[in-house]
Amino acid sequence: MPHIVAGPTEARIRKQDEGMSKRVVVLGIQWGDEGKGKIVDLLTERCEAVVRFQGGHNAGHTLVIKGEKTVLHLVPSGILRHGVHCLIGNGVVVAPDALLQELETLERAGINARERLTVSPACPVILPSHVALDQARERARGSKAIGTTGRGIGPAYEDKAARRGIRFGELADPAKCIARVGHLLDYHNFLLKERFGESPVDLNRVAKEIERWSSELAPLTGDVSRAVYTVTQNSGNVLFEGAQGTLLDIDQGTYPYVTSSNTTAGAAACGSGVGPLILDVVIGVVKAYTTRVGAGPFPTELGDETGRFLADRGHEFGATTGRPRRCGWFDAVLARRACNLNSVNSLCVTKLDVLDGLSEIAICTGYQLGGELMDHPPWDAIVLEEVEPVYEKVPGWQESTAAVRTLEGLPTAARRYLDRLGELLGVAVDIISTGPDREDTMVLRDPFSLASTDSP
Ligand code: GDP
Ligand code: IMO
Ligand code: MG
């Protein structure tokens, strides 16, 4: 075999592996709202930068610090830690009006987010006509509606793929940008009027907004790929913050009841402008039960008293739209697939406290379909609608686990439940969350000291 000399990239990665910079991905392995924001915020204590790499302001990430709640949609969940650089990577679709509103809300709370925020010039821009199209399409789907957040996410990604979209970097030259938006609006308005019978979007109104976006937001544009590279070169830790969840991934999720981006770990690299080999650890965040907002299959959904118990105790209302979330038992079949899709090598279980007081807890370990037992999910969402979950019943606990911060402080049955989840997914439970507050968390194994080879 020829002797291959390590190239600069390989050498750099090896150098960083020698106990310095760590790059950790945090993402959801269900249908979203697993508590990703809380975990990212917690872990940023040891980070120099946090990168959002996909999705847009369809996300709602809730951070609670000493009882004070902040909900973030576009700004990465590192913003509440002084000195942390927050980056919005090229994979994110950016609604300038929503970004401005979020920055203003943060400023009113005394956080000068602009000082620490960089947005990739390659981010597709969400225009008011994307929002109109998203909502018009949903209305036209009638009973088959996806239940989108209505924020223009799908149409903005469509325009990106069709190579006709406007990118964030174009805001720097408002005159040129307005001319390009004019062409795009011709097309969007044609669809709105002729296809959906809806009102068109007025170019003059959008042009005025572009002037404002240009003066207020264009200065935030910067080279996100280079920023991440620089942090890693200087031995700093970087977090990659997922939005939505694995089961909402455009390719691997419950299509068509999904979002319009790749939400899985591979997107952390291409949505930030870094190579996949720099990712060391992938933390899969999972609720101790399952929830879903919007339409689509949900095998373990509970339409009964227990479902209402989980919704009430877990305050299961969407952080973005306020819609009630559907609730059900933990689905280990889907969660295991999600771990594989993401190379999850560290598990974080949230909302354990919500299960307090149940005498018995069920875990779905397989599906029945037409007399056949399955231990893996079907690829087709229509078939997933038809499966019957097979449950393993485990004892619950009566003690409160709310705000418990040590493993020893948990009831034995709760520890057994966590062990069983880890066993079924084949990944160690490294972080446990027992309440919404940053402090209500146990970190059993520090993700910044795990290496990429620490696989399950
Ligand atoms: P994300 O989208 O994954 O960041 O999650 P969301 O913020 O949309 O939803 C999670 C909700 O659960 C928020 O209201 C959090 O404050 C709350 N939460 C997070 N972890 C816990 C926990 O361990 N226990 C309880 N009771 N609430 C939690
Ligand atoms: P976070 O980051 C839960 C769901 C919507 C809908 C589908 C498509 O807070 O976990 P879209 O507007 O993206 O085209 O809607 O995806 N959805 C989410 N569900 N949490 C989210 O984000 C979501 N973002 C989108 O409800 O079913
Ligand atoms: Mg959320």
Image: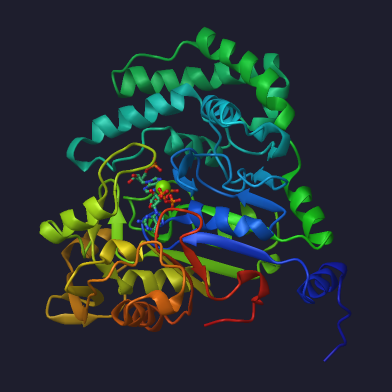
Residue 359, position as x, y percentages in the image: 16, 73
Q: How is the image coloured?
A: rainbow
Q: Is residue 262 visible?
A: no
Q: Is residue 32 visible?
A: yes
Q: Is residue 355 left or right of residue 182?
A: left
- Between residues 305 and 240, which one lies in front from this camera angle? 305
- Between residues 352 and 259, which one lies in front from this camera angle? 352
Quarter of the N terminus within the rendering: bottom right
Q: Identify which residue is drawn at 63% across, 15% down.
A: 212
Q: Identify which residue is drawn at 24% across, 36% down.
A: 141
Residue 337, position as x, y percentages in the image: 39, 72
Residue 6, position as x, y percentages in the image: 86, 77
Residue 86, position as x, y percentages in the image: 66, 44
Q: Is residue 423 above or below residue 268?
A: below
Q: Quadrant of residue 322?
A: top left
- Between residues 68 and 255, which one lies in front from this camera angle? 68
Q: Is residue 323 left or right of residue 179?
A: left
Q: Quadrant of residue 356?
A: bottom left
Q: Identify which residue is drawn at 13% across, 56% down.
A: 303
Q: Identify which residue is drawn at 51% across, 25% down.
A: 127
Q: Is residue 281 left or right of residue 154?
A: right
